Amino acid sequence: MSYIFPRRVLRSGDVMDNVELTEDITPAADRVSGKLNMHNFNQGIAASVAIDGEAFYSIHHYEKFSPFLWSRPFVPVATPPWGFPDGLTATDQVLVQNNFEWQALVDGTGEATEVTLTTGQSILWINAYVQYLWWGFNPTPGSITTSSSTAFSHENNATSVPCNLQFALRVNGNVIRETVTGIDDLTYRVSVPIKPLQQIGVGGTVLPGPQDIRGEQVCALGPPCLPIRIGACVPCVPGPQKVEIVVRRVPFITDTGVRQYGSYDKIYVYCRQVNVVELKSFPIDSVGPAEVTAPAFEPEEPLTTLTMYGNRVQPVVNAYNDVQEGSLARGALMHYHLPPATLGFGQDTFDGTSSGVWLFNSFYPGWLLPARDTVTLTAYAGAQATGWSNVAGLRLNNVSISTGRKILVLGNLQIRNVVGRETSPGDPDMNQAPYAVADIASFALFQLMWQPSTNGPTAWTSMEESLGMVNNFIWFTREPPSGLQPGDYLEGWGIENVEVHLMAMLDLPASATPINLGIFGSVANTNNECEVIRGSLSFISLRE
Amino acid sequence: MAVITPNTTYPAGPFVVAAHNANIYSTTSGRGIMSEPNGGLQVVNLDAAFTVKDEHIMPQEAVMALMDGTTVPMDVYNNAFGIRDDSDPAYVALAGLCQRVYFPYPAAFASWQWSFHVSVFRPFMIDMENQSGPDIAAIAVRVFVDGVELPAWRRNFPVSAEVDVQNNTFNNHEQICPLWFDLTYLQPAPAAGYHDIAVKLYLPRVTYNPQGLDPDPDELNIDVPLSAFSPSGATDVTVNSTVHTRISFGTRNVRCVMFK
């Protein structure tokens, strides 16, 4: 209810009218009976008013840690190099069907990658994460046909065939089209942009044109190993909601037809998360009514302490001195009545184009505790240390956890040159010197980690569900040999420029000791290394 | 303000008009059941167990979220930009990756997020015969928030093809390179008013200038056999062709989540 004023000012000598006397008091009683609004509250309440943990939003999260199972024997303990990440199954992995249908991510135990919640009219802010791997690196379970170097080998020809995965968010059974990680038209083929400068009719061959060189199918994700994050803001109507991340595999269409899947043509989804922050607009009623009555005066009703004060003025005064949750109208409070909607945020960035790219080559320490939390301070050097290495110094220090909160952590890295330094012997008969080849089974791994700020520099804890991995999928770039002497080769290039997406929801008990957050990286095999070009790390401390 | 204190409890005796009026409306702090709640209620007036519940908050007064996007694929070739050799090329905003939002009040921060599926034809150019070093065609997208570029969020794209400039051969590996990008930027303390994000693109012409020694390199041309253009084309007849770059965007969206 807006500002109210008395309809009259009682003056000496006025006739006491029961209606006018009623109108002196009842508007104030009406207002405090569920009609208080933004006009009634002072902005000063923002400083100290108590806020329900789900007043601004509610947080719903699903996560599953599903590590890669490497071919390195794990008896009794394993040490790097790790070999190949495929060939071994576990019930927490999700096998992608090869049938071009949107598929929920349900693992071997029947557990679905989904979040269910009941909302009012809200907007669902969704961030979801998956890591996938196309099997075929490990030659043991398959039957890889070797080329000039086994480094090029992949059972399912990932060197020339895309894995063609599309992920998307699905809300209440409807795929959110703007989140499909690809192009909905699976036949979409682009042209090779090498443009003839004249009508193609030279040399006696007359063809219609100019025309383009037909390109390849590019409607889905190509590399065999990627961490993917998808987000959306989806309005929803009141009722139960189900948010999933779904996947489908697009058939690879070539000039000669649709490529058939082989017996070992398997894509598994590993770590996965779905985070839904319900941003409330018109929530469901949760507050009971608060009612104050100031009965109307009857004609000839005597004016006594009881009838004036005890029955009417006093209840209203008391109600204003003890405002109940139900005294407020829906939407009574404006932004200036409210404290900050979050408990903090922060961001760190890295731009290697100005400061120099950041190299690392420390070995992945493994997926079991306590090895999983091993951190090394050894910088990039010839010898590979073992442990996670803080990538590009990306970290956020002294993040407060003084009160209960959930911290959404989002990280991004642009990386390249996920290379191994395998050497092809060359071919003396062809006057070809040895040269470096890019080993597509070169893997770089990443994860988010946290530590109490009082911990030492190597005492960190993994947010293991954020584990992401990329491989060297740009295997074909290399410089020509610079000489003919054995070993006189130039290095291969790996211009992946691939985006590493990381995500985690940290839910810690309140503590007076703040925490640090960081992005960490490692590599799987001997002579693997990786360059970080740019990156960012951000966190949002959400109320709970 | 303080708690409301009645000016009179109407004791037995004459009805005091001024005291009654002050009970109803007063310019004195702490008096008047009509005047005091006119913008004066403070935490001290609230019940000890009072907490602000979700339904107490006016929609969009604490958090706002907007999303825009498109599913329409878009191919952009470098010759769409013409030839510009200046050091500050004109980056062009990409449809489906821009958003303008009105913040009705100052926010603590805004979370800008943008996602896109992308496939590029980006050649790795070499001269095998003369053993010259490689050159790579430039492709980058930049992101601007309120007109200011965020350098740490600039992104390059994978090399997806090889071109031997001397032997006039090329190999296209574009099908294994399509990627998905999902990025987040937290804008601190945006003021009330309009704010915008724009992901922008510029593709320069393609030249082969591995050491950067040529101050005015020509656009790269190679002789391509007709068979590359058509199965019925001759393999021994070539047509001079210009090498371009291309970037193809698939599904893309941009989101803004603002927190008071």
Image (spheres, rainbow, N blue to C red):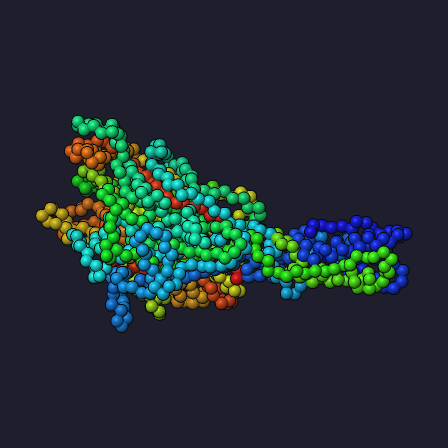
Q: Residue at x 36, y 45 (%)?
A: A184
Query: Image quarter for residue B12?
Result: bottom right
Residue A366 left/right relative to A476: right
Q: Is residue B6 above or below residue B226?
A: below
Q: Is residue A174 above or below residue A109?
A: above
Query: Image quarter for residue A120?
Result: bottom right
As drawn, the residue found furthest toward the left would be A429
Residue A464 left/right relative to B5: left
Residue A38 placed where, x, y %? 65, 52
Residue A51 placed where, x, y %? 59, 60
Residue A171 left/right relative to A470: right
Residue A104 placed where, x, y %? 38, 56
Does residue A328 appear anywhere in the picture? yes
Q: How many marks?
A: 0
Q: Residue at x 78, y 51 (%)?
A: A6
Does residue A485 appear anywhere in the picture? no
Residue A148 left/right relative to A451: left
Q: Nearer the viewer, residue A285 or B77?
A: A285
Q: Residue at x 30, y 53 (%)?
A: A98
Residue A59 placed where, x, y %? 49, 59
Q: Is residue B97 above or below residue A97?
A: above
Q: Nearer the viewer, residue A100 or A317?
A: A100
Q: Residue at x 48, y 50 (%)?
A: A234
